[in-house]
Amino acid sequence: MPVETMKDIMNYAAGRYGDQDAFRYKVKKEIHAKTYRQLKEDTEGFSRSLMKLGLLGKHVAVVGAASYPWVVSYFGTANSGGVIVPLDAGLPAEDLCQLINRADVSALVYDGSREDAAQAAKEKCPDLVCLISIKAESHNMEESLPVYSFEKLLEENRGEFDVTLDKDKMCAILFTSGTTGISKGVMLSHKNLTDNAVCLDMKIPSGTVSMTLLPIHHAYCFTMDILKGIYIGITICINDSIMHVSRNLKVFKPEIVLLVPLVIQSIYAKLKDAPKLLPKHLIAREAFGGRLKTICSGGAYLDPDMVVKFKEYGITILQGYGMTECSPVISTNLEWENKVGSVGKLLPNCEAKIVDEEIWVRGSSVMLGYYKMPRETAEALTDGWLHTGDLGYVDEDNFVYITGRKKNLIILENGENVSPEELENQLYKSPLVKEVLIGESKGIIEAEIFPDLEYAQKKKIKDVEGALQEFVDTVNQGQPPYKKIRGLKVRDTEFAKTSSRKIKRNQ
């Protein structure tokens, strides 16, 4: 039987992996586990709950930290023919209400950390029919909107649920957290998400232990950590807080994790500051719980030097490339098939071409369009080809190379084009540079840098700006005149970032 929907993935996994742990997570200090069979039962229980509430086929939003109920809500909604709208738990309540209204949401699932958003939604989201609280122990029908207990709903609606799904129909709206401009609601179908998760065999054995470290509402985390993890029988451990990462690595001992480059760079800074007397593999064991072998990197460009440096610690980094509009993976390196400097080989369900130096991709993972944004959809898609906005090329072996972002290109008065990412990656080679943005100021290229003050203190660097200027001068050597960094601005605060830890450029 072909696997064409997320429900197919759920049925396949429950049948194949049965009593194996699908999820492990902490409740206070105790570790709980759910098997693949229990996961299927719980998602069907949520689907039955939606049916009882008259919400089948409706749009359901979920907001909160990564949790097992979050995952159940996602699958329970999409697998019953509805549309799931995962929201960024870090957004202010006002912004969340705007997205709820824009996505035509009928029910909001929320955890205890976003009670404020639920309260605001009662007043500002007139189309909401009900709220579903992950924290509440009982239903509350006294409020202006009924508030149902997630656990109580599952208890009351146990049983099988089945429905025929259209693989090409929208099942999710994912709002982008772009570094510039207004967020857009990316419409994804069952086929988009399912094909992205199942089309490539990464030879990861079932029973491998992973741990979620990225924001769960993002396509990268959900498709690769959750959806692909379920399909191949991984045991997925849920990190309950960014504050508990170090502790949870030691508790769950993952063998594989997904990270973004900014986090990888910050981890490396800590690894190399460890006592030099200890062997590198022991330093890594202590930092990552003892079993970590593989890091999958995505979300932004990773300096190829990081791949080499982590190898010294016994850890393989597999660099990939994608975007929410492609569900999200477009290409990835594999342990047995990779090229240093590339962002990987195109997935089997994806093809690419270069149009005016921009990478366009086409395949079964490409989005349906942007929700209620026909102009933006027309700008992004041409005859099924997705305009990625990334500049680069694809070699004869279908490996993808990124040289910059089309939107970020700096066009100087003399007509020369400068890719800021290219220079930023050079500057990141200095341990004194924690964060950097390259821009144009009064006709010249300027670097705005937030230095690593902890590193400066350890190395007794008193003139931080002078040391940074010295490194900028080094980077400038060998650059053509129009690419030279002629301005330097040193920040005393971090840059504002998206929830996926990308620096916002419009600041």
Image (cartoon, rainbow, N blue to C red):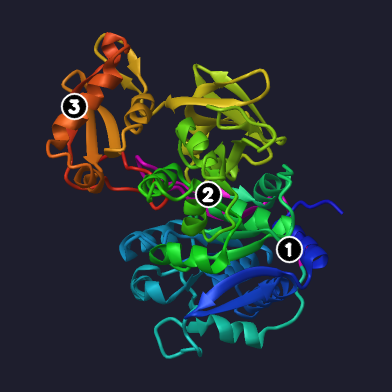
What kind of residue is marked 2? His
Given residues 418 and 104, the one toward you in this image is: 418
Please name the predominant secondary structure of the magenta segment in the image: loop
Image height of 313 relative to 229, above or below: above
Is 186 left or right of 476, judged from the image as shown?
right
Read off the residue under disc 2. 281
Residue contact at pointers 2 and 1, CB within 8 angstroms: no
The quarter holding residue 414 reads: top left
Read off the residue under disc 3. 469
Given residues 348 and 327, the one toward you in this image is: 348
- Taking the spot 74% from the left edge, 54% from the top edge, the residue there is 205
Read off the residue under disc 1. 10
Q: x and y percent of residue 341 in the render?
A: 53, 27
Q: Looking at the image, is mark 3 or mark 2 earlier in the sequence?
A: 2
Is 355 left or right of 439, judged from the image as shown?
right
Image height of 377 relative to 45, above or below: above
Residue farthest to the right, as pictured: 1
What kind of residue is marked 1? Met
Mark nearest the camera among 3 and 1 is 3
Residue contact at pointers 3 and 2, CB within 8 angstroms: no
